[in-house]
Image (cartoon, helix red, strand yellow):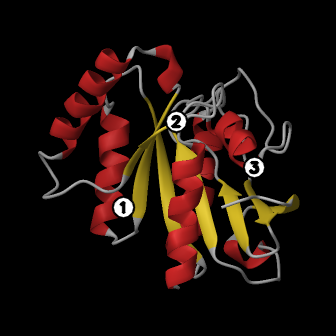
Amino acid sequence: MIIKEALFAGSSQRTDQKPKAVHPEFAFIGRSNVGKSSLINRLCGKKGLAHTSSTPGKTQLVNHFLINNAWYLVDLPGYGYAKMGHKGREKLQDIIGDYILNSEDLVLLFVLLDSRHDLQQIDRDFINELGERSIPFALIYTKCDKLGPVALQRQVEHNAAILLENWDELPPTFCSSAETGKGREEILDYIETILNNL
């Protein structure tokens, strides 16, 4: 897939505030500071489209980006740690839950995982809940340029073994790097394949 146009289409806290034009939605989520905004910018080939920050919890709204006037890339707040109080974290969880459970246009959720670390319990809990609620998803490992190929493969296989304790089979899995562009074509081609089958 070639991205010719990527436009910010609006921010919302509830699904009834989403952009009025209806298109298929592919959403991105991960633990705070997993490199989500950087990956989105790389996928779209547009620096500064999604705001990046070294401070976890920067994204606090559901942000829609219209791609090629055909589908939305949706940037969701990160789950887990964010520099805010308990009430603030609860509010973010409400925003995330409302979107994932109530957006009728959500086609697929990409769950981002840091390739340098073992799965945390919060990742496992989030992924298992997606399964319980029958939310279609795929996994994207981020920052894959930070590990050598052998270490990367070992880490991905280790995390896969952890997931297979609860799952019969794994969802589609991609390795990516916002720095080098690794995985970009594969992720966009996967989206294109799904769009063609809708």
Q: How many marks?
A: 3
- Identify the residue at image location x=11%, y=45%: 165
The kind of residue tagged 2 is: Ser
- Residue 121, relative to residue 61: is it above or below? above
Marks 3 and 2 sit apart, C-alpha to C-alpha, by 14 Å
- Which disc, if any, is residue 176? 2
Mark 1 and mark 3 in contact (Cβ < 8 Å)? no
User: Element type at marker 1?
Assistant: helix
Residue 97, given in percent of the width and then of the height, sits at: 53, 62
Residue 64: quadrant of the picture: bottom right
The numbered dot on residue 130 is 1
Q: Is residue 60 left or right of residue 168?
A: right
As drawn, 50 above or below 167: above
Residue drawn at point x = 18 percent, y = 57 percent: 169
The mark nearer the N terminus, 3 or 2, is 3
- Give how far across and how far down residue 41 sits, in percent: 75, 41
**Tag 2 or tag 1, which sits nearer the N-term?**
1
Can you identify the residue that label 3 sits on? 44
Q: Residues within 10 Å of mark 1 (few under 14, many from 20)?
A: some
Could one spot residue 75 in this view of the protein? yes
Q: Nearer the viewer, mark 3 or mark 1?
A: 3
